[in-house]
Amino acid sequence: MKIEHNKNFTVGAVITCFMLAVILVGMFWTPYDPNAMDGAAKRLAPCLAHPLGTDNFGRDILSRVIEGAGATFLIAAATVAIGLAAGLVIGGLTGWYGGWLDECLMRLNDAVAAFPSILLALVLIALMEPGRSSVILALGVLFVPSFARIVRAEVARQKSLDYVASARLMGAGDVRILLLHILPNIVPVLLPSVAIGFNNAVLAEASMSYLGVGVQPPDASLGRMLNEAQGYLMSAPWYALSAGAAIILLILGFGLLSEGLGGDAGA
Amino acid sequence: MLVTLLLISLLAFLAFQIIPADPVTKLLGTDYTPERAAALRHELGLDRNVLVRYLDWLAGFVTGDLGVSYSYGMPVSEVMAGKGAVTASLSVMAWLLVIAISIPLGITLARWQGRRLDRVFVAMNQVFMAIPPFFLGILFTYVFGMVLKLFVPGGFVQPEEGLGGFFGYLFFPALAIALPKAAMVTKLLRSSILNQMGQDYVRTAYSRGNSRWSVIRTHVLRNAVLPVVTFVSMTLADIVAGSIIVEQVFALPGLGRLLLASISNRDYPVVQCIVVIIAAVVVFMNYLADVVTQYIDPRIRLG
């Protein structure tokens, strides 16, 4: 697989590595306890002790942004993992075997894909209990169609190629051909879509949490923080800015990465 | 198109049957007794077969009877009256803004490819694409609402009280939805034009003495705009979803707020209605995009 070493890729890799490093460190250490309240330090402007200031409960915003970025990242990663796993199985089977099952599933795919996914996720989550696992489940299910479609198209294209025929001549079974021969060949096509899917998941999670159906208080998530920050926009604008900037960095990093990998984040 | 719509309506309907949460429990609240629950269930028609209820609801939907809201006790059409206009105006305004910003900008950037202005805008584009619309909305509230005092945060003017104020209050929400999308369309249009610039017909056009600008204007644009039309029409789904969320940021009384309120009240007739209506609009717009694409490029046949 060839990675174009262009500027997009480099900048994207730097931003993403920075965010990943911050998130990784945040799992073990944050400057303060993200949920510790301090009545004496409410809505402090950024200063030496609190580089990004404090919120209305006197909680350290830097610690909460780190914690929230971690939560958002994990939810997005889990979502993409579910969508990708199911998409690989469904797309692989329908692309390989075709037939009426293929027709049915692709029709269903069209129906789901025609709909704004954030909206559908919103309804699904609200019907379950709002919370972290509901967000992952609902978004994961909604991400299946787009992955299934890409995998199906690629598998259908690859199966008529010579290397598949020769693998079959050597006596390889369907499963073996799909897993060992076709799968490695569709990874380069899949990788940019994974990055784009990840970005959509970050955006969707932030929206859900902002609307109050995602991560529940007192736990931090970037969308959740924006929801709280909006109430203190006049007296503590740095609160909203920090959370928003973290979301932008996450999305920007992966967007640039996916373009460096040859995808098109815009389409 | 019709099959897709039917499938969506069936999915929307079934989703509310599968989930364990019971609207009757929510409606009765502390007055809950098994007898009352059974009576209410009968009154709402919830004790009938799922398929019968689906067909019944679908027949009503087609004839304009959208059902009765559980929590308001009014027909759904009355609950939704006026709210749909807000969301529709917001979405259309955002969509027009996307086109108004991205088409001239995309063409200009392609025309001035490689110059400093182009490089600056391409980098800015990349950043704008990464901004969530609702965060942009929060920024606008702060900058234009609180610091510059161009509008009152949380305020709104009903269309009957003056169209100027109505559209004035929709402008910044629409801009918040539009900018990230406009960045994507600009980028797509720019690269689509630059892609075409390497084609043989462009070299022919140059050899006949055309300038770069007149080549773009008379030859390239017609070919470059095709993928953009498809993409712009597909963004409508995202714009509608975006307005649902951005309505929340600016406290606009549209379908989005109604949807969220109805979801938490377990007011399923309203939720179903909004879901199916939005889906219908989106599916119809996609169909329209196909027609327009075919009109621009007769080589493409509708499948």
Image (cartoon, coloured by chain):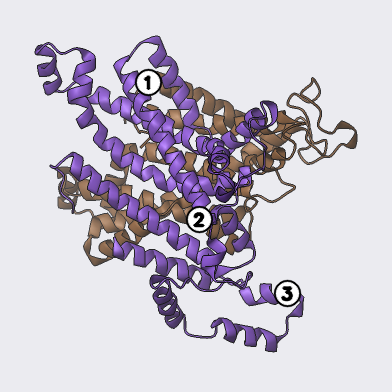
Chain colours: A brown, B purple
Residue A4 seen from this side: yes
Location of residue A68 (image quadrant): top right
**Quarter of the image with the N terminus of chain B in it:** bottom left
Of badges 2 and 1, the one in the foreground is: 2
Marks 2 & 3 on one chain? yes
| Crowding near the residue tagged with mark 3, few <14, some 14–19, many ≥20 C-alpha atoms within 10 Å | few
Marks 2 & 1 on one chain? no
According to the picture, the residue beneath numbered tag 1 turns out to be A5
According to the picture, the residue beneath numbered tag 2 turns out to be B84
Q: Residue at x 54, y 83 (%)?
A: B45
**SS state under label 1:** loop
**SS state under label 3:** helix
Q: Residue at x 20, y 49 (%)?
A: A159
Q: Image height check: is A21 above or below A157?
A: above
Q: Image height check: is A15 above or below A143?
A: above
Of badges 1 and 3, the one in the foreground is: 3
**Numbered label attached to residue B29:** 3
In front here: B171 or B258?
B171
Residue A191 rendering spot, x and y as whole percentages: 38, 38
Could you tell me how far apart the alpha carbons at marks 2 and 3 are, in whole angstroms? Answer: 30 Å
